Image: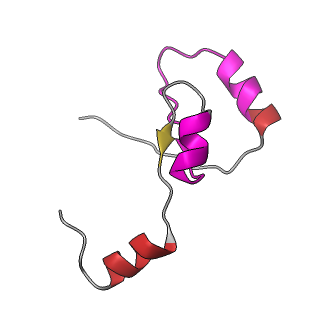
Amino acid sequence: MTILSIMVTDIDATTLAKLLQKVDPFRKTIIVDCRPFIDYNLLHIRDAINAFYSKMMRRRVYDNKVSK
């Protein structure tokens, strides 16, 4: 049986830098970049995931027009 613990935290750049310096082989850190795709595409942290949720996407989800 595997127990998965997920913690989501909004942090600043200094805190992120400190966390990335501490390497823990038993813990996977996922960095989610919520900036618009253009900003993310110009510059982002290696292996970060872009998850910008625009007003248009919110509307499409609300209207049930997003393909699954």
Q: Residue at x 50, y 35 (%)?
A: 30
Name the quadrant containing residue 42.
top right
| Position of the C terminus by quadrant | bottom left
Out of 16 and 63, give the one closest to the viewer: 63
Residue lying farthest bottom? 63
Name the quadrant containing residue 5.
top left
Q: Say left or right for 33 vs 58.
A: right
Out of 56 and 19, give the one closest to the viewer: 56
Q: Is residue 62 magenta?
A: no
Extent of the magenta region: 16-42
Q: Residue at x 72, y 45 (%)?
A: 11
Q: Residue at x 62, y 33 (%)?
A: 43
Out of 36 and 25, give the one closest to the viewer: 36
Image spot of residue 63 (x, y percent): 29, 85
Out of 41 and 52, give the one closest to the viewer: 41
Vertical relation: 6 (above or below) 30:
below
